[in-house]
Structures are given as structure tokens and as C-alpha cells.
Amino acid sequence: MGGATGDGGAEKQRLDHLTGARCLASTWIVCGHFLPPLSPSALTPARHRGNVAVCFFILMSGFITQWVYAARIVEGNVVEIQRFYTRRIVRVVITTWVAMLLGLVVLLIQLKGALPNLWHLVRCFAFLETWVDPLDWCPNGQTWTVAALLPSWLLYPLTCGAIAAVEKRAGSAGLGMLAALLWLCSFGPELFLFWRQGGHLSNEQGIWSYVWPPAQLPDFALGCVCAALARRQRAQLPTSQPSSPNSVTSRASDSSIDGEAMSPACQQQRRWRVLPSLWFGLFADMSVAVIALLVIAVPPSDAPRADREVLFNHGLAPLLATFLYASSAEGGSGLVARLLRNDALVGLGEYSFEVYLFQYPLHEIFVALGDISGSYGMRNAEGTHNTNSSGFMAFFLTLWLFAGLYMEHVESRLVSC
């Protein structure tokens, strides 16, 4: 769930729309966890399907890792591999430990002095608990995502080499077949159990197919394959291909260069250069439209996070991958990508990882402050869900502020070390 940071300013600009998407995805997840339930509406099913946003984060982690590091890792340079591990893993692990410590403090307060199992805590901080028992949550439950991504990051040099070998041997067709195989590995077991059990999947089965680290390996690798395909597409474009849809439109409409009229052949060549951006943008927008339709229109299951809801863990990965590929292969083409490049979304998206990790402990701090002071209450009498909309907004704004301060003044120093 790292940032969309490239090797330079131009590389980063091509992925700005993905940074903006991270802002919306993290907001979706936080609202799904803590937004007070209101009267049912057309958007109610979407609120509880934040697992689609998590799937997007996993795919995007693989996509950005491949986009940024593949050219250096595939050469097998030991120094570059060590640098990858340092920049990509160490910062994330330290931030996760900080979030887990904050969650542990909150847990100790909630337990009123009782101590949780020591070996459970050791396994949590070693990112091993989700391998043993995904249902036994760590002090900060959201840290399971880092535990799930860690094997993918550690194995990335091998993944990168395998993708390069497939691309060299079979080209785009081979990469496409590899992408289909990876999705079958992640979604196939869920779909088979769903069919075998008469359209039923338990919450426990859903957690194992979601939180258990091996379950996320194929989605990360699928993101890597999409990046390889996008890079391949960019390499096939003419060197004068514009890098953004805005420049495509303006340059394609020019009929002269330096005051001289363009020949019909040159104008025809420019028109053909515009077409890939338009088609890829259309595919990217259509994939987002279909995702939105499925997330909103598919009726929710009677049991929360069970039955057909489990299928959303990996079921929409091809559509999410299509958006990543189609919107990035042409430098951020499509209406959705243009909207996501909004400066406000991109700026907040830089803090989405921290928002995701710190959401639980900060929310519980808000709950505790209300309970201790008696001035407000965040939850219903049973403590099952939030009921204070004003309290949620205060928490939500504080969460983004805290994430930004931590990123700018703490985590940024870890990156520079």
C-alpha cells in the first residue's frame, strides 16, 4: 500500500491519478468501518464492500512496485535489491509497528489492566499471527494488510524475474495468460466453494481467503503483470506520443508546426497517435463504471461478510486490473483518471497508507474520550456501531490531520535515512 512514487517527476506525474484513487479507497474503507448507519439507501451495499478497496490496494501495490523497480531489479543487481528492500519494506514495517503499539496502548486501556497473551503479541509484531490464525486479530486489526503484503514484497525479485521471462518468451499474450492464471488462483477457490456449498460461504472462510497472507500473493502478482503490460504498451508508442490526455487533445488539433502547414500524411499520423489514448481511456472508464454498478446493484447477503460478499474479496480484480493498466499505459488517460488527478485528491492520497493504519486506534481514542468525559458518546448502548455523526466527522478529520503530520514529520525522515 505504498505510494505512487516513481524514479522522477515525470514518472510520478503519470501515476498521480492512482495517488488520488488511494484517497478515495482509504475513505471508503474508513467509512465502512466507522460511519454511523443511516436509513438504507442505494449506496448501503457499497458501504460494506470495502474489501473491493482493499483488493485495489493490493493490486496497486504490485503495480507500482513493478512500475518503479522492475527495470533495476530484473538485472539482479544485489545493491538495487537491497535498496528495494530498504525503501519499500523497512519504512512500512516501522510505521506498522508504531500503529500497532498505539493500538496496543488502546487495548490495554480497554482491558483495564489485563494483559493480552504475550506470544500472540510476539506473533503480531513478527507478522506471523495471520499465518497461524487469521481470525485472531492483532492489537491494531488493520495491520493484517501489511502482514499479507510482506511475503509479496520479499518475493518480488523472484516475481519480477518470472514476469520478465514470460514477457521475453511469449510477449503480451503470455502476460495476459499469466494474469488470467493468477486471478484463477485467487478467485477460483472461493468460487468453487461457493458453488459446492450451494451458494454459501461462511464468514470464517471469507477471512481465510482474505486475511491469510498466501491468499493475497496472486493479486499482488497480478498488479505486477498489469504494470509490465502497461510498460510494454508505452514502449510501443511513437517517441513523440504526448504524456497526458490534455496534451493529446491540444497537439492533435494543431494543423501546423512552427507556423508551417502539416502535410496530410503527417496529420493522419497524428490522428492515429490520438486513438490509443482515447480507447484506453474508454476502457479505464468502463471498468470503473462496471465496478460501481456491481458494488451498488448486487443485493447484500443476509449474513454480513458471508455468502456472496466473500466473492468481492477477489472477484472484481480483473476490472480493477483493467483500470490500472488502461489508465496508466497512456499516461493517465480517461475521464476518471483526469478527475483523480485533482490536486486535493492527490495531496490527501499521499497519506492514505497512514490513514488506513491509524484509523482503529484513533477511533478508539475518540470513543474513550467520550466515555471518560461523559460529554458525548460515539456508540450505541450495545457498543456494536457508531451513532454519533458529528463525532465521526471530528474523528475523520483528525485522522487525516494525524496521518499527514506523521507522514511529513516522522515517516519522511525514515525514508531519507
Image (spheres, rainbow, N blue to C red):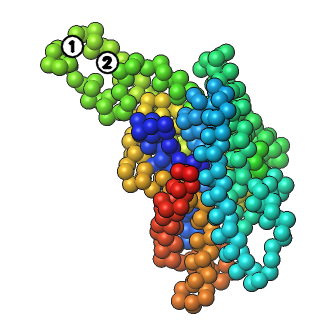
Give 57 or 197, whichever is nearer the viewer.
Answer: 57
Q: Amino acid at mark 2?
A: Arg
Name the element at disc 2: helix
Q: Residues within 10 Å of mark 2 (few under 14, many from 20)?
A: some
Q: How many marks?
A: 2
Image check: 143 left or right of 11?
A: right
Residue 224 placed where, x, y %?
Answer: 62, 34
Q: Residues within 10 Å of mark 1 (few under 14, many from 20)?
A: some
Image check: 16 left or right of 169?
A: left
| Residue at point 71%, 75% (across, down) | 107
CB contact under 8 Å: marks 2 and 1? yes
| Residue at point 35%, 33% (across, down) | 245
The quadrant in which residue 96 appears is bottom right
| Residue at point 49%, 39% (across, down) | 6
The quadrant in which residue 164 appears is top right
Q: Answer above or below: position of 206 versus 274.
A: below
* Whole-number angstrom distance, CA of label 2 to CA of label 1: 10 Å
Find disc 2 in the rendering and name its residue: 270
Residue 266 placed where, x, y %?
Answer: 28, 12
Which numbered tag is attached to residue 262? Answer: 1
Give 3 or 236, whichever is nearer the viewer.
Answer: 3
Image check: 282 left or right of 82?
A: left
